[in-house]
Image (spheres, helix red, strand yellow):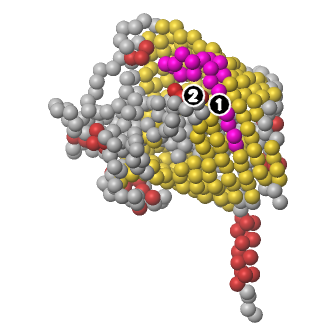
Amino acid sequence: MSIKPEKIIYVCFMIVFAALTNSVSAVQLHNWREPLFLIAAEMERTESSPSGMFWDDIRTADIFDRTIWPEKEILDSNYFFLEPSATGAFGPVAEDKDDDFYWKIGMLNQIRYRNLLIRQTLDVDKRYQYDSLYPAHRERDVRGRIGEAFLQVDWKYGFFRLGRLNRNWGPFADRSLVLSSNPYSYDALEWQLHSSLFEFRHLFAPFHYERRNHRDTDDNSNVNRFFTAHSLNLMLGKWVTLGITESVLFTRKSDFPDLQYINPFSIYTVVNTNQEGKGNLMLSFQWNIHPLTEDISFRGQVAFDDFQVDDEVASDKEPTHWGLDMGLFWRNPFSITFPHLLKAQYNYRSPWLYTVTDNNANNGERYIYWGKSLGFQQNDGDRVSGGFSIAGDNYWAAEVELAFCREGGRDVLTRWNDNETGNTRGLPSDSSYTTQKAFEFNLKSIVYFKDYADLALKGSSMWVKNRDNIKGSDFEFIPSIQAELSIHFSDFKLRLP
């Protein structure tokens, strides 16, 4: 008996679609829901990935009013979804600007059909005017970007994604030391594989040479930049999650990148150390541990940039560049009706984190994209804080925080000056910087009406010494108040056949 080829194709097609059942209810990470989502994420009342170590979007949480979250019944089916939003705020726009008002407009459109997801977001923001690294025309009255635009194919054990979006790799939904939403979004190929025991992701992004203004090389070198990263996280039941992440920023004069850094199953640390391919390597470890009870979580991430394995040559004597971000979170410690969280956090970034030697900086190997760090926003500083957050009955939330922080004078664009006469090649020539110190008291409250409007009130009191790293200045009191009103409409939903 012969079987027609078209029947074989049809059967294979149906088998594939039967396996592609991993549709999700989600919207983009930078969304009007983000402040509420971050509270839910810290309380572990929501998730963005099986391991909880990848944050790509906002999903349904089991706190706050259910109408603010993406509707699972709609978004798990075939649909077209459109969500406009507009925000206006009174308060400080930028630290060195006198403007006390800004506005932003957003538009999300999203289509899911079976296993296919297409998302696009348009962000128009007055604050782009004050960003010296905004990659377009800051002098224009309207400045905007396509923040997210991607096609994603889901299946039962993962996905394949092509395009741009904001993401944070690590245990914290709003930041990461190695791969974060701090820079402007970039186009990449990313894929995921997961089971009940592990989650693995690999990402590759070409940052090709822009001939008009190559701001990511110190001397406008004619090179192409590439970024690759992969991460493996093991889930040991509901008590422990441990992971390792490697990433490499490398440059080549050729348009085609090195295969050893595209290979998702290679070990970049070994490849880089053995000099099979030059590049700026970042290695990190992340964890989320629940000691004895699910209500207490100790989670964090430690990153090493250009760590040294020996001291045979001068360049191996350079100080290790590293960062640490960790926190202890205690959910519902008090006899309060509402969900609440008590937390203590510490963050440290060494002075030369994300930077490279002058030769490598000229060659475009800084750990940056369009002048912004691919990891944490700044290096050379630390911060310790204690805080309390509470999720009110349906329509409100509040947070309070007390912190002490220090900031040095170096940033991700600081040069080592190791090529200058009298300095040692491969070693940063350390200048003397005065450390800025500050005590902070921050208070934030949010009131929202379903998914139509929300009002956020933020108050901050800072006592700053050596402001802007100027030695000898006394403690200066800097108060700040901001009110932000956002309106949005989330009912433009159309089911598709």
Left of 5 or right of it: where is 274?
Answer: left
Q: Amino acid at mark 1?
A: Lys
User: Based on the displayed image, in which of its 4 quarters is residue 321 positioned?
Assistant: top left
Instruction: Name the residue that disc number 1 marks.
Output: 104
Which residue appears at 69% of the width and 54% of the height?
117
**Magenta residues, as a range?**
89-108
- Count of marks, rendered view: 2
Instruction: Name the residue that disc number 2 marks.
Output: 127
Which residue appears at 28% of the width and 38% of the height?
358
Please identify the quadrant where the N terminus is shown.
Answer: bottom right
Evaluate whether residue 60 shows in this view. no
User: Based on the displayed image, in which of its 4 quarters is residue 467 positioned?
Assistant: top left
Q: Earlier in the sequence, mark 2 or mark 1?
A: 1
- CA gap, disc 2 and disc 1: 8 Å
Please identify the quadrant where the C terminus is shown.
Answer: bottom right
Most extreme residue toward the left is: 422
Q: Residues within 10 Å of mark 1 (few under 14, many from 20)?
A: some
| Of residues 434 and 346, the one drawn nearer to the viewer in this rendering | 434
Disc 2 + disc 1, Cβ < 8 Å: yes
Q: Position of residue 366 (x, y in %)?
A: 38, 41
Most extreme residue toward the top is: 474
Q: Is residue 486 above or below residue 193?
A: above
Q: Position of residue 215 (x, y in %)?
A: 40, 39
